[in-house]
Image (tube, rainbow, N blue to C red):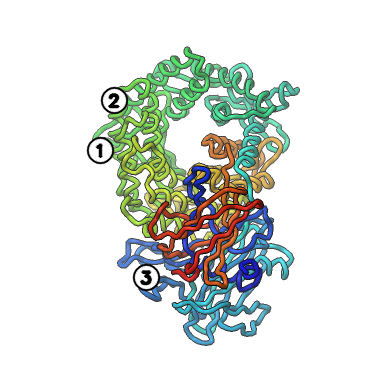
């Protein structure tokens, strides 16, 4: 009976309707294997047409319940839809209304601009794209108009009403299916992908825009859910693909021509280990420029990462000795030539003249981390370890002395050299002569920030190097210097600047990452670093706030521009959550952080497709700044059209290392290989990058002109894609970082929810897939009022084991790996 019910259209509708409104939370347990890890995959609304695919929710804030601006009284409600609310801070006007106590919906009226949202789709499965929503028609003959526009300007129009009235202009008329709920809302299902394929001959890939408007009268819209499908990919398969790219780039850079042991470009000098070729045509392999000055290149960091990875392939066995040889030669050259004897600070080295360069600033922490990483990779080289500790200690002492010398009263003006005021800061970069960098005029940097006596992204980078040295040479001056920098960091100023964005992109994220990294390098002994990072995180993510009503988390769900820049927002909650409980008793394992982390992951995953449509809509710029400019302390999208003083750096475009870094974080913190959605998204974007940007000798780099125009990038920055930019290879370094966390090293045994539907018996029926013969337990929790949930929304699954309100159903998988559980009385639960 259950199978027959699911095969009909009404059965499919109820599967969707349950997801939209009344579906209990489901949790799977498998005590037979001794596991209590909550299954991270959630409910599939329909029988899978292709066993190689699974459904994913791609619309954000479909329930219209999210607080967008806490500066208003009462707080302003909003949604991640263009034209849904006024973007200016402190203006509460918006289209989201409270139609019942604690219940919000989007109110549309005839003649008003449509609200819209862009969703990113996986092309090969885009024809499965499905949209469901609930609507209440306030006045007759009100109708809801849904317009779907694809990237290639194909358009479909749907007219939704209580009855299927004839539609004009080729629109598709749809009537409500099933009875209205208690609040008077009727549910609709739009098989958009199927209709696009049937009417236009092409699926809506790689993105499409949903537009909602009203005709004939006012309409309330609620519980919008859009789902499409991703490929099933095993974590170990993704690991093998990423490791292959890491090996390939190393081979291209390191191996000598002639095929001994592998053919390559020999861009790393066999004698010194220095990187010799700095600009290579990614298509032909021609070396376009040689490096006149040398230090530590990205290739050297990649070599260290690779030697820390397990690679048992035949190619790996050939490559590893070569990597070790080049790395040892390079670290020997650095210790001999990249230190200025007069000051003991690091410098670059000119290969042609044989002279050290004093005109370029460099990060002391970068040198310290690299040297100590190499020493750890070669534990048998005791003399090397002792030399590294000696050099790094001397540099750390010098940095502390410089900071003390330039920590002057505020009345003393800023200056680079002797007598200048650094206001107690620890510069991220310093010249070999001990001078701070010159403030740049067109692009602001730390020297610019110090000259204005304000904080900066990298205020605690040097703290990382100091604490790493402190473990070997525990000197009180190191911790005192870091404490002074924390004392001067103006958290309140930064927090006021951008409302939500400050915590997801601005100075908080990068600095809290550095603080917690320094805490880890101190052996978890410098607890003042953790305490300061905790206070910074508490500013917007209070530990005692309900996770589903926290402004910081809701801001992420609204589309904060962490999706346009480095995933700095992850690092505070991630590291505090994952720290050992004995090192961080205050918040290790805090559930609120787990919720925030997953929201960040899913927010980022929904937007990463590296082509002209890989980002979200530019109209959402109040939450996502794709390309930012500044004028004094004001920062906004460059498209705003002011007379800017400068821009904030390169456009965030493909192949976006920032985007890949964010995806790597999702693998690291989103249950790793246990969450197939995160693994699948990484694989999808990896495949797109290979198809669009990969060339025989590296990657293209830059921003497509079309993308730049859409996001208001200045014309001078629209150089298009380039074949000769080494930064295109930076995506491979992120692959190596992703592999280092070890989350992709094994495939966990998985139990999957295949279908959920209300049966004719009134019960909630759940069909499962799992290992044949294995016993499992399904828990259904009805405590949650589920809004904005989709077929793989993790919140459907988050419930404590043994919760008193949870109902239980024990199942055993048959020989085909299938099982079914029924929960009487839950199908209509609210």
* Direction top: furthest residue: 383
Residue 657 is situated, as x and y percent measured from the top left of the image, at 56, 42
Residue 329 is situated, as x and y percent measured from the top left of the image, at 57, 17
Q: In this figure, which residue is indicated by the disc labeled 2?
A: 477
Q: Earlier in the sequence, mark 2 or mark 3?
A: 3
Q: Earlier in the sequence, mark 1 or mark 2?
A: 1
Residue depth check, mark 2 versus mark 3: number of the one nearer the observer: 3
Judged from the image, the secondary structure of the residue bearing numbered disc 1 is: loop
Judged from the image, the secondary structure of the residue bearing numbered disc 2 is: helix
| Circle 2 Cα neighbour tier, 10 Å, few/some/many (<14 / 14–19 / ≥20) | some
Query: Which residue is at the front of the view, 703 or 565?
Result: 565
Judged from the image, the secondary structure of the residue bearing numbered disc 3 is: loop
Query: Which residue is at the front of the view, 460 or 549?
Result: 549
Residue at x 61%, y 60% (from the top left corner): 228
Circles 1 and 2: CB atoms closer than 8 Å: no
Q: Quadrant of residue 165?
A: bottom right
In this rendering, would 751 be left or right of 805? right
| Circle 1 Cα neighbour tier, 10 Å, few/some/many (<14 / 14–19 / ≥20) | few
Circles 2 and 3: CB atoms closer than 8 Å: no
Residue at x 68%, y 60% (from the top left corner): 49
| Circle 3 Cα neighbour tier, 10 Å, few/some/many (<14 / 14–19 / ≥20) | few
Give the distance between the C-alpha atoms of the residues marked 1 and 2, in whole angstroms: 22 Å
Residue 77 is situated, as x and y percent measured from the top left of the image, at 39, 66
Q: Quadrant of residue 267?
A: top right
Q: In this figure, which residue is indicated by the disc labeled 1?
A: 410
Q: Quadrant of the N terminus?
A: bottom right
Residue at x 36%, y 53% (from the top left corner): 497
Q: Earlier in the sequence, mark 1 or mark 3?
A: 3
Q: In this figure, which residue is indicated by the disc labeled 3?
A: 102
Residue depth check, mark 1 versus mark 3: number of the one nearer the observer: 3
């Amino acid at each position: 009976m259950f199978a027959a019910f699911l095969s009909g259209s009404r059965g499919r509708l109820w599967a969707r309707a349950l997801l939209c409104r009344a579906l209990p939370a489901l949790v799977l347990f498998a005590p037979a294997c001794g596991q209590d890890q909550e299954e991270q995959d959630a409910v599939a609304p329909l029988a899978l047409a292709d066993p190689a695919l699974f459904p994913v929710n791609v619309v954000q804030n479909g329930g219209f319940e999210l607080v967008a601006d806490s500066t208003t009284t009462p707080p302003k409600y909003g949604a991640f839809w263009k034209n849904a609310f006024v973007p200016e801070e402190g203006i509460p006007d918006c289209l989201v209304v409270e139609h019942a106590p604690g219940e919000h919906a989007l109110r549309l009226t005839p003649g008003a601009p449509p609200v819209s949202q862009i969703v990113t789709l996986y092309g090969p499965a885009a024809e499965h794209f499905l949209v469901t929503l609930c609507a209440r028609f306030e006045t007759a003959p009100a109708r809801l108009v849904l317009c779907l526009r694809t990237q290639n300007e194909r358009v479909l129009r749907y007219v939704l009403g209580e009855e299927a009235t004839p539609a004009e202009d080729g629109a598709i008329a749809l009537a409500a299916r099933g009875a209205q709920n208690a609040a008077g809302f009727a549910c609709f299902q739009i098989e958009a992908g199927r209709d696009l394929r049937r009417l236009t001959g092409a699926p809506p890939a790689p993105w499409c825009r949903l537009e909602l408007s009203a005709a004939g009268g006012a309409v309330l819209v609620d519980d919008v859910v859009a789902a499409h499908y991703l490929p099933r990919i095993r974590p170990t398969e993704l690991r093998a693909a990423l490791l292959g790219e890491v090996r390939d780039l190393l081979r291209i850079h390191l191996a000598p021509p002639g095929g001994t042991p592998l053919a390559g470009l020999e861009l790393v000098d066999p004698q010194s280990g220095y990187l010799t070729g700095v600009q290579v045509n990614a298509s032909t392999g021609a070396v376009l420029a040689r490096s006149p000055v040398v230090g530590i290149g990205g290739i050297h960091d990649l070599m260290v990462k690779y030697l820390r990875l397990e690679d048992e392939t035949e190619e790996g066995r050939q490559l590893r000795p070569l990597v070790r040889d080049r790395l040892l030669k390079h670290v020997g050259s650095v210790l001999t030539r990249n230190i200025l004897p007069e000051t003991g600070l690091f410098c670059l080295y000119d290969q042609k003249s044989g002279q050290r360069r004093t005109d370029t600033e460099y990060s002391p922490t970068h040198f310290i981390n690299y040297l100590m990483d190499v020493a750890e990779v070669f534990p048998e080289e005791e003399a090397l370890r002792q030399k590294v500790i000696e050099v790094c200690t001397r540099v750390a002492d010098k940095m502390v002395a410089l900071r003390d010398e330039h920590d002057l009263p505020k009345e003393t003006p800023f200056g680079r050299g002797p007598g200048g005021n650094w206001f107690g800061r620890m510069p991220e970069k310093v010249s070999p002569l001990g001078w701070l960098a010159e403030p740049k005029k067109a692009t602001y940097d730390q020297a610019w920030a110090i000259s204005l006596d304000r904080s900066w992204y990298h205020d605690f980078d040097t703290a990382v190097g100091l604490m790493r040295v402190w473990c070997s040479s525990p000197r009180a001056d190191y911790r005192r210097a870091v404490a002074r920098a924390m004392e001067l960091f103006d958290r309140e100023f930064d927090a006021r600047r951008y409302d939500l964005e400050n915590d997801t992109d601005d100075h908080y994220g990068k600095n809290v990452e550095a603080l917690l990294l320094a805490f880890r390098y101190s052996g978890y002994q410098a607890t003042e670093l953790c305490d300061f990072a905790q206070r910074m995180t508490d500013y917007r993510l209070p530990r005692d706030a309900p996770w589903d009503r926290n402004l910081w988390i809701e801001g992420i769900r609204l589309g904060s521009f962490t999706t346009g820049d480095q995933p700095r927002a992850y690092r505070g909650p991630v590291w505090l959550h994952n720290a050992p409980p004995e090192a961080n008793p205050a918040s290790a394992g805090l559930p609120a952080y787990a919720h925030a982390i997953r929201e960040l992951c899913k927010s980022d995953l929904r937007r990463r497709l590296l082509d002209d449509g890989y980002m979200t809509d530019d109209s959402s710029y109040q939450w996502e700044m794709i390309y930012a400019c500044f004028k004094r302390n004001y920062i906004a999208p460059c498209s705003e059209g002011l007379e800017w003083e400068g821009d904030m750096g390169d456009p965030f475009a493909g192949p976006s290392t920032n985007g890949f870094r964010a995806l790597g974080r999702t693998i690291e913190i989103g249950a790793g290989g246990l969450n197939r959605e995160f693994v699948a998204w990484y694989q999808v974007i990896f495949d797109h990058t290979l198809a669009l940007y990969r060339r025989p000798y590296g990657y293209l780099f830059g921003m497509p002109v079309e993308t730049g125009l859409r996001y208001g990038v200045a014309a001078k920055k629209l150089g298009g894609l380039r074949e000769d930019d080494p930064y295109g290879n930076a995506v491979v370094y992120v692959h190596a970082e992703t592999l280092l966390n070890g989350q992709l090293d094994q495939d966990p045994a998985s139990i999957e929810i295949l279908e959920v539907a209300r049966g004719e018996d009134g019960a909630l029926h759940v069909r499962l897939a799992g290992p044949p013969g294995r016993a499992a337990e399904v828990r259904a929790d009805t405590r949650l009022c589920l809004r904005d949930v989709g077929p793989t929304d993790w919140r459907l699954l988050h419930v404590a084991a043994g919760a008193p309100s949870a109902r239980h159903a024990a199942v055993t998988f048959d020989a085909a790996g299938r099982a079914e559980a029924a929960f009487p009385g839950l199908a209509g639960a609210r």
